[in-house]
Amino acid sequence: MSNTIICIPARFGSTRFPGKPLVSILGKPMLWHVWHACIQVVEQAQVIIATDHPTIADTMTSYGAKVVMTDAHLPNGTLRCFSAWQSIQKDYPHITSLINVQGDEPALDPNHLKQFIREGTALNTPVFTPRVKMQGENDLWQSPHVVKVVADEKNHALYFSRSPIPAQERSNQHLWYRHLGLYGFQIQDIPSLEACPLGVLAATEQLEQLSWLEAGFSIGLVTLPPSGPAVDVPEDVRAVEQWMSRTL
């Protein structure tokens, strides 16, 4: 994994949850938990945090993290990672893949991240991302905060949605998969992906990855074991702390 760089985008001004990266999870900022999981992935070239806010930068620098400042007006985490990469790429000429780990996944298992990087880079698709099978989690399947994904026979993504997809009864749960907030990119494809306009479907669903599908890029899927919950809204913090307290 020495040819891989991990980037964690962290925006302070979240619409649904302002200041979310610094919310306390078991006594430490949520972003610290994500960063700590990432640095446990052995032999990675570097882990960087891409942020727009000096408080986030100062907080994470105090823990020893490498931080890259980015424009506050960037519309999403992927473009924040791309911007950070552009500012440091000359220092890492051997890097072939960039991993975007969303900063709201404090329960991320480092072993799952290792599996994702290992299997995803072998797919040779411009983009790769993980999915997790849902088993009896009807509330998650119905929730607009949980992104669902369906795939073709080659495990390439067909569509992502905040709505329940595919539209089936609970007896057919073998087709239920949720998407996790991780993305892998082949370095040579980043300029083309960055140039993709916001697609109609992406704007409708508020899901950036649909722009790449609309533009004709393949997105490979890596199936990971069940993982802990993410933090989308303030009400999720307690559930995440309870989950982490049981599993740590």
Image: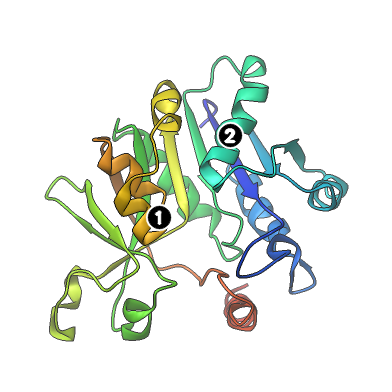
Mark 1, secondary structure of its residue: loop
- At a point 47% along the width and 56% down the height, the residue shown is 181
Contact, mark 1 vs mark 2 (Cβ under 8 Å): no
In the picture shown, does residue 136 fall above or below 228?
A: below
Label 1: few (<14), some (14–19) or many (≥20) C-alpha neighbours in 10 Å: some
Q: Where is mark 1, residue-wise?
A: 207
Q: How is the image coloured?
A: rainbow
In the rendering, at what x and y percent does residue 201 appear?
30, 53
Residue 211: quadrant of the picture: top left
Q: Residue at x 37, y 63 (%)?
A: 225
Can residue 29 be spotted in the picture?
yes
Q: Which mark is residue 44?
A: 2
Mark 1 is on which residue type?
Answer: Leu
Please report the residue visible at 88 percent of the width from the left and 48 percent of the height from the top: 62
Quarter holding the C terminus? bottom right
Of residues 50 and 174, the one drawn nearer to the viewer in this rendering: 50
| In this rendering, position of residue 2 left or right of residue 53 | left
Q: Position of residue 3 (x, y in %)?
A: 52, 25
Residue 191, given in percent of the width and then of the height, sits at 45, 24
**Is residue 49 toward the left or the right of residue 212 in the image?**
right
Local secondary structure at mark 2: loop
How crowded pointer 2 is (Cα within 10 Å; few <14, some 14-19, many 20+) is rated as some
Nearest-to-viewer mark from 1 and 2: 1
**Type of the residue with mark 2:** Gln
241 over 64 or under it: above or below: below
Residue 35 placement, left or right of 214: right
Q: CA distance from mark 1 to mark 2?
A: 28 Å
